[in-house]
Image: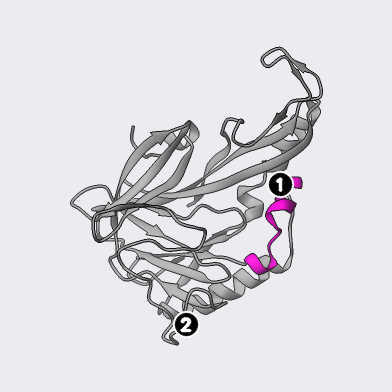
Amino acid sequence: MPLDPASLRTTVYKIGQITEANGAPSPYGAPGQRQNNTPLAGDGTGRQPNDENTHFLLPANQTLSYALRPQNGVTFLDFGPAGAGNKIVYLPYYQNNITSAVIPAGDATVNRFITDEMSGCNLFIDRLPNNDLVLYHANALKYSPTMAEVQADAGAYNAMAPVMMDNQHGRASRAYAGAVSLTVLRVADYYGRAQGVVDRKTGQGRTEVEFYGGTTIVGFRIGGAWEFWFQTYARLAYKRPKLSFATLRHGQRVTPNDARYQIIETRRFWP
Protein backbone atom coordinates (compact mmCIF):
# COMPACT_ATOMS: atom_id res chain seq x y z
CA MET A 1 0.00 0.00 0.00
CA PRO A 2 1.92 3.06 -1.18
CA LEU A 3 1.53 6.53 0.29
CA ASP A 4 0.48 8.41 -2.82
CA PRO A 5 -2.20 10.95 -3.81
CA ALA A 6 -4.63 8.22 -4.86
CA SER A 7 -4.42 6.53 -1.46
CA LEU A 8 -5.50 9.76 0.28
CA ARG A 9 -8.91 9.35 -1.33
CA THR A 10 -9.52 5.92 0.19
CA THR A 11 -7.42 5.65 3.36
CA VAL A 12 -7.39 7.81 6.48
CA TYR A 13 -3.81 8.65 7.47
CA LYS A 14 -2.59 9.81 10.89
CA ILE A 15 0.73 10.29 12.65
CA GLY A 16 1.76 7.14 14.50
CA GLN A 17 4.90 6.30 16.49
CA ILE A 18 8.39 7.76 16.40
CA THR A 19 11.43 5.62 17.11
CA GLU A 20 13.65 7.34 19.64
CA ALA A 21 17.44 7.43 19.52
CA ASN A 22 17.64 4.42 21.84
CA GLY A 23 15.61 2.39 19.36
CA ALA A 24 12.50 2.12 21.53
CA PRO A 25 9.23 3.17 19.87
CA SER A 26 7.26 5.71 21.86
CA PRO A 27 3.66 6.73 21.22
CA TYR A 28 3.17 10.11 19.68
CA GLY A 29 2.66 12.51 22.58
CA ALA A 30 0.31 15.33 23.39
CA PRO A 31 -0.31 18.04 20.76
CA GLY A 32 2.66 20.31 20.42
CA GLN A 33 5.10 17.78 21.88
CA ARG A 34 8.01 16.82 19.67
CA GLN A 35 9.25 13.27 20.20
CA ASN A 36 12.09 12.94 17.76
CA ASN A 37 15.81 12.30 17.71
CA THR A 38 16.80 15.91 17.06
CA PRO A 39 15.36 18.91 18.90
CA LEU A 40 14.24 21.94 16.99
CA ALA A 41 16.54 24.93 16.92
CA GLY A 42 15.04 28.06 18.44
CA ASP A 43 15.22 31.59 17.10
CA GLY A 44 18.49 32.34 18.92
CA THR A 45 16.82 33.78 22.02
CA GLY A 46 16.93 30.63 24.10
CA ARG A 47 13.15 30.43 24.20
CA GLN A 48 11.34 27.19 24.83
CA PRO A 49 8.33 25.74 22.95
CA ASN A 50 5.96 26.96 25.68
CA ASP A 51 6.82 30.57 24.80
CA GLU A 52 4.52 32.30 22.32
CA ASN A 53 5.20 33.68 18.85
CA THR A 54 8.57 31.98 18.54
CA HIS A 55 9.95 30.47 15.34
CA PHE A 56 11.37 26.95 15.73
CA LEU A 57 13.35 25.62 12.78
CA LEU A 58 13.82 21.99 11.89
CA PRO A 59 17.58 21.36 11.51
CA ALA A 60 18.80 21.31 7.92
CA ASN A 61 18.67 17.93 6.18
CA GLN A 62 16.63 16.39 9.02
CA THR A 63 14.76 13.46 7.48
CA LEU A 64 13.20 10.31 8.85
CA SER A 65 12.14 7.00 7.37
CA TYR A 66 8.49 6.01 7.48
CA ALA A 67 6.44 2.85 7.50
CA LEU A 68 2.68 2.38 7.16
CA ARG A 69 0.70 0.53 9.84
CA PRO A 70 -3.05 -0.11 9.29
CA GLN A 71 -5.03 -0.30 12.52
CA ASN A 72 -8.73 0.11 13.37
CA GLY A 73 -9.73 1.69 10.09
CA VAL A 74 -6.78 4.13 10.01
CA THR A 75 -3.28 3.86 8.55
CA PHE A 76 -0.64 5.28 10.85
CA LEU A 77 2.71 6.62 9.68
CA ASP A 78 5.44 5.40 11.99
CA PHE A 79 8.79 7.20 11.83
CA GLY A 80 12.31 5.91 12.39
CA PRO A 81 15.89 7.01 11.71
CA ALA A 82 16.55 8.10 8.15
CA GLY A 83 17.69 5.35 5.84
CA ALA A 84 18.35 4.91 2.15
CA GLY A 85 14.65 4.82 1.24
CA ASN A 86 11.27 6.15 2.29
CA LYS A 87 12.81 9.46 3.32
CA ILE A 88 10.32 11.92 4.69
CA VAL A 89 10.47 15.41 6.21
CA TYR A 90 8.24 15.48 9.28
CA LEU A 91 7.32 18.91 10.65
CA PRO A 92 5.87 19.09 14.19
CA TYR A 93 4.13 22.09 15.72
CA TYR A 94 4.15 23.99 18.99
CA GLN A 95 1.08 25.69 20.40
CA ASN A 96 0.99 29.46 19.71
CA ASN A 97 4.28 29.23 17.79
CA ILE A 98 5.43 28.54 14.25
CA THR A 99 7.76 25.78 13.04
CA SER A 100 9.47 25.43 9.69
CA ALA A 101 11.40 22.93 7.60
CA VAL A 102 13.25 23.09 4.29
CA ILE A 103 12.50 20.60 1.53
CA PRO A 104 15.53 20.31 -0.76
CA ALA A 105 14.82 20.72 -4.45
CA GLY A 106 17.85 18.73 -5.57
CA ASP A 107 17.70 15.68 -3.30
CA ALA A 108 15.51 13.12 -5.04
CA THR A 109 15.91 10.65 -2.16
CA VAL A 110 13.61 12.85 -0.07
CA ASN A 111 10.23 12.16 -1.65
CA ARG A 112 7.60 12.79 1.05
CA PHE A 113 6.65 15.53 3.50
CA ILE A 114 4.13 15.46 6.33
CA THR A 115 3.23 17.81 9.13
CA ASP A 116 1.31 17.24 12.34
CA GLU A 117 -2.42 16.93 11.84
CA MET A 118 -4.28 20.23 11.59
CA SER A 119 -7.60 21.34 13.04
CA GLY A 120 -7.19 25.12 12.93
CA CYS A 121 -3.54 25.77 12.05
CA ASN A 122 -2.23 27.28 8.82
CA LEU A 123 0.38 25.82 6.47
CA PHE A 124 2.54 28.28 4.51
CA ILE A 125 4.81 27.42 1.58
CA ASP A 126 7.71 29.64 0.43
CA ARG A 127 10.32 29.19 -2.27
CA LEU A 128 14.01 30.01 -1.84
CA PRO A 129 16.32 31.37 -4.58
CA ASN A 130 17.87 27.89 -5.03
CA ASN A 131 14.33 26.44 -5.54
CA ASP A 132 14.23 24.74 -2.14
CA LEU A 133 10.81 24.95 -0.50
CA VAL A 134 10.14 26.11 3.06
CA LEU A 135 7.07 24.73 4.86
CA TYR A 136 5.71 26.48 7.96
CA HIS A 137 3.18 25.11 10.48
CA ALA A 138 1.62 28.10 12.28
CA ASN A 139 -0.52 27.68 15.38
CA ALA A 140 -2.77 30.24 17.09
CA LEU A 141 -4.47 28.15 19.75
CA LYS A 142 -4.80 31.25 21.92
CA TYR A 143 -7.30 32.69 19.44
CA SER A 144 -8.75 29.49 18.01
CA PRO A 145 -12.17 28.02 18.82
CA THR A 146 -12.15 25.50 21.64
CA MET A 147 -12.66 21.80 20.99
CA ALA A 148 -16.15 22.06 22.44
CA GLU A 149 -16.97 24.92 20.06
CA VAL A 150 -15.74 22.95 17.05
CA GLN A 151 -17.66 19.87 18.14
CA ALA A 152 -20.82 21.95 18.31
CA ASP A 153 -20.10 23.94 15.14
CA ALA A 154 -17.58 22.58 12.65
CA GLY A 155 -17.36 26.05 11.09
CA ALA A 156 -16.46 27.83 14.36
CA TYR A 157 -14.09 30.70 13.59
CA ASN A 158 -12.17 33.51 15.29
CA ALA A 159 -10.94 36.26 12.97
CA MET A 160 -7.90 36.94 15.16
CA ALA A 161 -6.39 33.48 14.57
CA PRO A 162 -5.42 33.96 10.89
CA VAL A 163 -4.07 37.44 11.68
CA MET A 164 -1.79 35.98 14.34
CA MET A 165 -0.61 33.21 12.01
CA ASP A 166 0.04 35.63 9.16
CA ASN A 167 2.20 37.67 11.54
CA GLN A 168 4.03 34.52 12.65
CA HIS A 169 4.81 33.66 9.04
CA GLY A 170 5.93 37.19 8.25
CA ARG A 171 8.49 37.09 11.05
CA ALA A 172 9.58 33.49 10.46
CA SER A 173 10.24 34.00 6.74
CA ARG A 174 12.98 36.51 7.60
CA ALA A 175 15.12 33.56 8.68
CA TYR A 176 15.29 32.48 5.02
CA ALA A 177 17.02 34.96 2.73
CA GLY A 178 15.11 35.59 -0.47
CA ALA A 179 12.05 33.54 0.55
CA VAL A 180 9.06 34.18 -1.70
CA SER A 181 5.57 33.27 -0.52
CA LEU A 182 3.79 30.73 -2.75
CA THR A 183 0.58 29.80 -0.93
CA VAL A 184 -1.14 29.34 2.41
CA LEU A 185 -3.64 26.66 3.40
CA ARG A 186 -6.14 27.87 6.00
CA VAL A 187 -8.75 26.14 8.10
CA ALA A 188 -11.46 27.67 5.92
CA ASP A 189 -9.93 25.73 3.00
CA TYR A 190 -9.48 22.30 4.54
CA TYR A 191 -12.59 22.40 6.76
CA GLY A 192 -14.75 23.89 4.02
CA ARG A 193 -16.98 20.79 3.80
CA ALA A 194 -17.03 19.91 7.49
CA GLN A 195 -20.23 21.71 8.38
CA GLY A 196 -22.00 20.12 5.43
CA VAL A 197 -21.27 16.67 6.85
CA VAL A 198 -22.79 17.71 10.18
CA ASP A 199 -25.83 19.24 8.46
CA ARG A 200 -26.37 16.08 6.43
CA LYS A 201 -26.37 13.95 9.58
CA THR A 202 -28.83 16.37 11.20
CA GLY A 203 -31.01 16.11 8.12
CA GLN A 204 -31.16 12.35 8.64
CA GLY A 205 -32.93 12.94 11.96
CA ARG A 206 -29.89 12.66 14.23
CA THR A 207 -29.65 15.02 17.19
CA GLU A 208 -26.80 16.33 19.35
CA VAL A 209 -24.42 15.97 16.40
CA GLU A 210 -20.80 16.68 17.31
CA PHE A 211 -17.84 16.90 14.93
CA TYR A 212 -14.51 15.21 15.66
CA GLY A 213 -12.07 15.61 12.81
CA GLY A 214 -8.65 16.58 11.58
CA THR A 215 -6.59 17.19 8.48
CA THR A 216 -3.50 15.37 7.27
CA ILE A 217 -1.22 17.24 4.86
CA VAL A 218 1.22 15.30 2.70
CA GLY A 219 3.75 16.45 0.12
CA PHE A 220 4.81 14.17 -2.75
CA ARG A 221 7.83 14.46 -5.03
CA ILE A 222 6.50 13.28 -8.38
CA GLY A 223 8.51 13.48 -11.58
CA GLY A 224 11.06 15.76 -9.92
CA ALA A 225 8.47 18.29 -8.76
CA TRP A 226 6.65 18.66 -5.44
CA GLU A 227 2.90 18.76 -4.99
CA PHE A 228 0.94 19.10 -1.75
CA TRP A 229 -2.39 17.54 -0.82
CA PHE A 230 -4.67 17.61 2.17
CA GLN A 231 -7.05 14.98 3.49
CA THR A 232 -9.79 15.97 5.95
CA TYR A 233 -11.44 13.20 7.92
CA ALA A 234 -14.05 13.02 10.67
CA ARG A 235 -16.00 10.89 13.07
CA LEU A 236 -19.37 12.17 14.20
CA ALA A 237 -21.02 11.69 17.58
CA TYR A 238 -24.81 11.89 17.59
CA LYS A 239 -27.97 10.50 19.04
CA ARG A 240 -30.37 8.29 17.15
CA PRO A 241 -33.92 9.48 17.82
CA LYS A 242 -35.58 6.41 16.36
CA LEU A 243 -35.43 2.68 16.83
CA SER A 244 -32.27 1.16 15.43
CA PHE A 245 -32.81 -2.37 14.13
CA ALA A 246 -29.04 -2.92 14.44
CA THR A 247 -29.09 -2.35 18.19
CA LEU A 248 -32.80 -2.59 19.09
CA ARG A 249 -32.22 0.38 21.35
CA HIS A 250 -34.19 3.60 21.24
CA GLY A 251 -32.27 6.88 21.27
CA GLN A 252 -28.86 5.27 21.32
CA ARG A 253 -25.91 7.67 21.60
CA VAL A 254 -23.20 7.04 19.01
CA THR A 255 -19.85 8.16 20.41
CA PRO A 256 -16.77 9.07 18.34
CA ASN A 257 -15.23 5.72 19.22
CA ASP A 258 -18.31 3.95 17.86
CA ALA A 259 -18.42 5.91 14.61
CA ARG A 260 -16.38 5.04 11.56
CA TYR A 261 -13.79 7.41 10.14
CA GLN A 262 -14.93 9.07 6.95
CA ILE A 263 -12.92 11.10 4.46
CA ILE A 264 -14.65 14.43 3.92
CA GLU A 265 -12.39 15.91 1.27
CA THR A 266 -9.09 15.21 -0.45
CA ARG A 267 -7.46 17.51 -2.96
CA ARG A 268 -4.20 18.99 -4.17
CA PHE A 269 -3.88 22.58 -2.97
CA TRP A 270 -0.47 23.45 -4.46
CA PRO A 271 0.56 23.91 -7.17
Q: Does 259 sit left or right of 208 as displayed?
A: left
Q: Residue at x 63, y 54 (%)?
A: 187
**Residue, disc 2:** 47
Magenta region, main secondary structure:
helix
Q: x%, y% of residue 31? A: 52, 59
Any mark on residue 182, and which?
none
Secondary structure beneath dot 1 equals helix
Secondary structure beneath dot 2 equals loop
Q: Is residue 126 magenta?
A: no
Q: Residue at x 48, y 31 (%)?
A: 73
**Residue, disc 1:** 151
Q: Which residues are magenta?
A: 141-154
- Three-letter amino acid code of the residue under disc 2: Arg
Q: Residue furthest top?
A: 245
Q: Does 210 sit left or right of 21 as displayed?
A: right
Above or below — where is 242 with respect to 36?
above
Q: Which of the two residues, 251 or 214, is positioned nearer the viewer here?
A: 251
Q: x%, y% of residue 43? A: 44, 82
Q: Is residue 145 magenta?
A: yes
Q: Is residue 153 visible?
A: no
Q: Does 110 sit left or right of 187 as displayed?
A: left
Q: Residue furthest bottom?
A: 45
